Amino acid sequence: MGRWTYCPRAARDTEFLSRPHRRRRAVVCARRLFSNCRPDIEAPSGGMTCSRSADIAGPGRQSDIACKVSDGERWETGDTRMLLKVDPVDSFSGTFRVPSSKPETQRAILTGTLAEGTSRVYNDLRCDETETMKNACRAFGAKITEHDGFLEIQGIGGALPQIRRVIQSRGSGLVFRVVTALASVLPSPVVVTGDATLCNRVMEPLLQALRELGADIESIVSENKAPVVNWGRGLKGGTCRLPGDISSQFITAILFAAPLADGPVEIEVTGEVYSQSYIRQTLASLTDAGIKVSASEDMRHYQVEPSSYQAQDVTIHEDYTSASYLLAAAALFPGRTVLTNVYGDSMQGEFAIVPILEQLGVSVTFDRATSSLTVDNPPGSLCGAFEVDVRDCPNIVPTLAALGAYVQGSLRVTGGRLTRFHKASRIEAMAAELTRAGVDIEVLYDDGICDGFEVRGARTYPGGVTLSSWGDHRIFMSLFVAGLRMQSANRFSGFEDVRLSFPTFMEEFTKAGVRTTAVEEENAPAGAVG
């Protein structure tokens, strides 16, 4: 089926950006460099996948194809894919460490980069997506040093350097969107790209809003999608408009770039504003860094004055999306579970997993003196009829589907329409895979849009099936948890992708006695296509 690799030439060849006045020639050259980037082929763990022109007739999605990694290259291993065989367990208890917050770490890296002076980020998360953010910020000129327990960031201040390069966002939507916005104020053009999954994601509202503020941005392959070239003409300021029901990252991206514009920036958001908690995290990060920013009570109007980022020291707290997998596993079995690196109240919308578990009858107790959380569920059962609105906590939608599979009664989840724009269409993915495992789950639609699901659970299921991650690390981790209470071992694709956000996932579950084995499967079915 041919060999698929990253684009090493595109990553190092920036000659097409060195003469901005030859714009037409530059774009043509850029398109030639990226012309073989396959938007329909997904690298299992990030990176732009490319192919020879003769290989274009290759397979559709690549999320379930095993790949080897060597010197930045990936290649298929024929019809063989690597799967993770996970044995069920009879109990789940112990002490586990929750990873630090990925969004908080990424925002702290950004503010430290844009500040003048030295910032420190304590208890930071180190995973693929925070590494991608660090590398992007280094490309802007920041000096980021990793120490035991903290990052030290020497920021670039308001004097953004002249750089001529390609900045790789891999699979991170936040990195691509923020870097694309910040590149508008650079004195030289920059290409911002990502892996094949990212190149399929919606970017048009952000690109159009940046153009309204004076940015000069062109897509290289597909119109209004990654990769893009930002010609660095600056942001003049003014008013831009964004939809509130696609991605809060659009708002976050412009909020980070707006202080560097020539004049004040106003953002007007149309429609309902989803994932407000992520926007509030951004506003808090900016305010703490000295930025003059305000937001209306309904989160539909924002104003940012030209201002300078100030260096600061930040301590990162727990990540409640990552914690949700451990919390869900603890809720499915009788016993006591203790989670460490947990500080309590949080601005994260996914903190909602705690009151949701309490509503399901699980006892959750915080101990701020030890920065820990204790989960008690003596009966090890979940019974009743429950309904949850997830418009402000979309990342725990897959976790709730896994939990719902064992609610003897029903769990109805609504407000999750944003998840169709994530790495996979998460509601449809979880419904398809859980149905394959025998779970009674129905997708719910609102005005024709996939918005949630209703699941009627059971005590257990036969298991012994092969489940696809749909190329999404959160789908894998949620299905992994659901499989722990089935009767036979299941096999899962996409297990390598835990390093995107929860690199110690396997290690933590091993502490509870979960046994996993990487296996090969010849001529395996292609799995679900998202």
Image: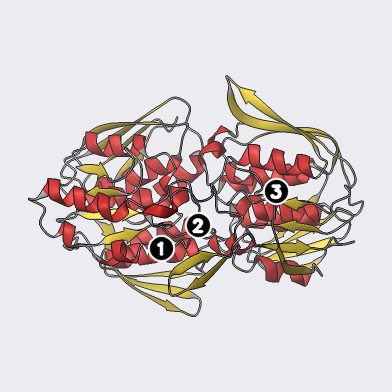
Q: Are marks 1 and 3 in contact (CB under 8 Å)?
A: no
Q: Amino acid at mark 2?
A: Ala
Q: Viewer-nearest of labels 1 and 3?
A: 1
Residue 354: image tag: 3
Figure check: 8 above or below 259? below
Figure check: 340 above or below 33? below
Disc 1 element: loop
At 78% from the left edge and 62% from the top edge, which residue is drawn? Answer: 86
Q: Is residue 145 left or right of residue 453?
A: left
Residue 493 seen in the current view: yes
Disc 2 element: loop
At 34% from the left edge and 62% from the top edge, which residue is drawn? Answer: 136
Residue 6: image tag: 1
Mark 2 or mark 1, earlier in chain:
1
Q: Nearer the viewer, residue 286 or 7?
A: 7
Q: Is residue 127 left or right of residue 32?
A: right
Categorize mark 1 by other alpha carbons within 10 Å: few (<14), some (14-19), many (20+).
many
Q: Amino acid at mark 3?
A: Val
Find the distance from the CA under tag 1 to the CA under tag 3.
41 Å
Q: Nearer the viewer, residue 132 or 250?
A: 132
Q: Which residue is mark 2?
A: 43
Figure check: 44 above or below 214? below
